[in-house]
Amino acid sequence: MLRAFVLAFALAVASGAPQARAEPIPEVVMYATSWCPYCAQARAYFKQSGIAYVEHDVEKSARARADFKRLGGRGVPLIVVGREKMNGFSEVGFEFLMARAARSR
């Protein structure tokens, strides 16, 4: 029930007033590790939902680790959509993140 509400809310926020041109969907970026179970949940959710994303492994890339720290990462995954970010992963939390990102554009 809550998930249906969140999806409806996110769609309503994202649709907003009619626009002259379609806005591109903000890029989804995930800072992760190969062994993290929450990262695996996020990957599965993105795949199931058809959400394109870019993943950076914070253990294999010094640049990814530096970006992760600069963004205030406290644990993995750190998911960034536009100017919005979230530490950890839950489906409902990600849907709220997408709604916030749509409002802040």
Image (cartoon, rainbow, N blue to C red):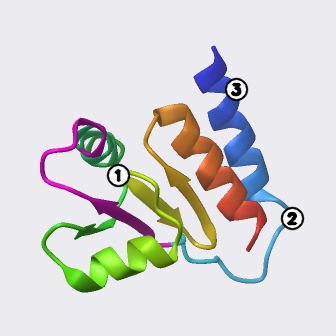
Q: In which quarter of the image is residue 5?
A: top right
Sequence-wise first label, 2 or 3: 3
Rounded to the nearest whole Å, what is the CA distance between mark 1 and mark 2? Answer: 35 Å
Q: In which quarter of the image is residue 17?
A: bottom right
In this rendering, position of residue 1 left or right of residue 40: right
Circles 2, 3 touching at the beta carbon (< 8 Å)? no
- Furthest-right residue in this view: 17
Q: Quadrant of the C terminus?
A: bottom right
Give the labeled residue for mark 2: 17
Amino acid type of disc 2? Answer: Ala
Judging from the image, what secondary structure is the residue with disc 1 in?
Answer: loop
Amino acid type of disc 3? Answer: Phe
Sequence-wise first label, 1 or 3: 3
Residue 76: numbered disc? 1
Give the labeled residue for mark 3: 5
Name the residue at 69% across, 82% down: 21
Mark 2 surroundings within 10 Å by alpha-carbon count, few (fewer than 14), some (14 through 19), many (20 or more): few
- Percent position (x, y) of residue 80? 50, 65
In this view, the residue in front, 89 or 15, is 89
The range drawn in magenta is: 27-39
